[in-house]
Image: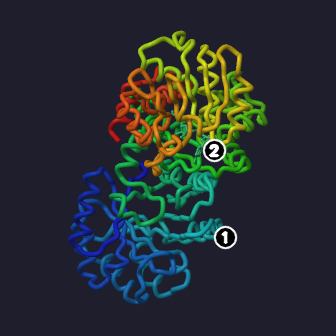
Amino acid sequence: MSTRLTAAIMVDSLEQGLADAARAAEFGADLVEFRIDRFTDSADAVAQLVQRSPLPCILTCRPTWEGGEYAGDDATRLAILEQVLTSAHPPTYIDVELLAWQKSAELRDRLQPLVQGDQAATGLILSSHDFERRPADLYKKIQAMADEPACRVIKVAWFARSLRDNLEAFEILASQYKPAIALCMGEFGLPSRVLAKKFNALLTFAAIDDTSGTAPGQPTLTEIKQLYRWDHLTPSTQVFGVIGFPVGHSLSPRLHNAGFDAINYDGVYLPMPIPPEYEHFKATVGTWLDFSPLHFRGASVTIPHKENLLRFVAESGGKIEQLSQTIGAANTLIRTGDGAADIEAINTDYAGALDAVCDGLGISREQLKGKRVAVIGAGGAARALVAGFAGYGSTVVIYNRTIERAQAIAQQFDGKVGKVVAAPLEKLADTCCEVFINCTPMGMHPKVNATPLPGDQPPACWGPGTVVFDTIYNPAQTKLLKLAKQAGCVTIAGKEMFIRQGAAQFERWTGQAAPRKAMAAAMVDG
Ligand code: NAP
């Protein structure tokens, strides 16, 4: 049976529980979990909830000692479960903690006859949760659940400390002889929740909306269905992602998943948070590539990992395109085969930015020759853009807070074709360039009131005929662009570059033309 999408519902009243279950059915859930931790005054009301639910349900009353909210006594909880299980409309599953099952002979004696055997109307989920870390005795717990004859489903959930935890969840799903649920909680655990279907879990949980989740890191039903392509996931789905830190704000999952949808490609694209240090990058990307059932085929790489990507690919014996080597940063990882060295790093920021400016001005790349371009910032994006504009003969001035970084880039690219010089950020006010490009994160969500301009003052030369391009795409209209518009400048939003650099990645990963219209529409919707 296909993995069931399960809406997790914390119940406070019969009406609210049923209303939420109806919404879950509307959103396309297959199952609901009624968490009755706070709804234990009347066993009759719980029985009603189960009976009138529009979807099959799991009934769970999670005690505080296992991370739930039920603080009552064991006898009350047991009496409720027993009454509902012996009613004319029992739930499809009940969830009981392994520890409770092991500790209480009374609980076992009274529930076992109601759940044991394939003919029982209700299946027993034995579960174990750790809200801090992967438990040291994880496999001992799984074995105990597997050995318990009354247990129909094994459930383990723990707080993930890194993306690598997800791989262990997938291994657990692959190796059990009973149906299983293996989930990682927290921001690193999203892959285990989305890819539960790829690895044939019994179910995954999702929240009805942003405020109603029952565990950290639960996506909403809409996210999992529409953004992460739930209905299309199969065991052979190819996995892609955006590697960064933080990465929750990234619009890349929307861009690429919309692209997969439009061409019916068996792929899914996930956020991949990896802490900044190279060792984290190397360990995570290395293990994800090694784990062949995952079919991890590529990634977009953003702040702060663009240099780490080059180092990783070089150390793995993979291929680095010449341009990325020159720029000193890459933004795309491509898997070209199954060997450890079958990986490639490329940079699509360069082409994305050049084309965004040229399309915005209605000119060809060749017509960039002689244009005076101010690049603000001297990080990975700036370096790519300087290489691009100087390569087409523009005169580039790099304005940066740390002048030494601007000088280093200027030294590298000056005279290759166009002229490149460095200047301190404060000098921006006096400049006379025709094109301005922000390559700093100043103004990016959530600091939307910031600009890279000293004192937030537009340069005196701004006016009609000046082009201001902000590489930031979230928000779509940054404060810098608003100021530029007020001054009469032509403005180009970061999403123009974003869509173009993403389309170039998409084409390398899939070998197919990127459905640019659908990808652009996915950006507009949000
Ligand atoms: P990066 O390597 O971290 O470089 C960031 C640059 O911003 C550095 O030069 C840094 O100056 C400067 N900076 C940071 N905070 C500053 C502050 N408070 N005041 C003044 N300067 C500051 O980042 P990156 O990879 O180049 O990316 C930069 C931006 O490009 C990001 O905002 C990203 O959204 C955008 N981007 C957009 C796209 C797209 O498709 N639209 C693609 C790639 C990047 P110091 O040298 O002094 O530290």
Label for residue 315?
none
Vertical relation: 16 (above or below) 341: below
Residue at numbered disc 2: 304
**Percent position (x, y) of residue 427?**
59, 35
Mark 1 sits near ligand 1, with its Cβ under 8 Å away: no
Vertical relation: 290 (above or below) 111: above
Q: Nearer the viewer, residue 167 or 423?
A: 423
**Percent position (x, y) of residue 494?**
46, 33
**Percent position (x, y) of residue 219?**
42, 54
Mark 2 sits near ligand 1, with its Cβ under 8 Å away: yes
Q: Mark 1 against mark 2, which lies toward the viewer? A: 2
Residue at numbered disc 1: 137
Which three-letter amino acid code belongs to the residue tagged 2? Answer: Pro
Vertical relation: 130 (above or below) 181: below
> Based on the displayed image, in which of its 4 quarters is residue 215 positioned?
bottom left
Q: Are marks 1 and 2 in contact (CB under 8 Å)?
A: no
Which three-letter amino acid code belongs to the residue tagged 1? Answer: Asp
The answer to whether residue 425 is visible is: yes
> Based on the displayed image, in which of its 4 quarters is residue 490 positioned?
top left
Q: Secondary structure at mark 2?
A: loop
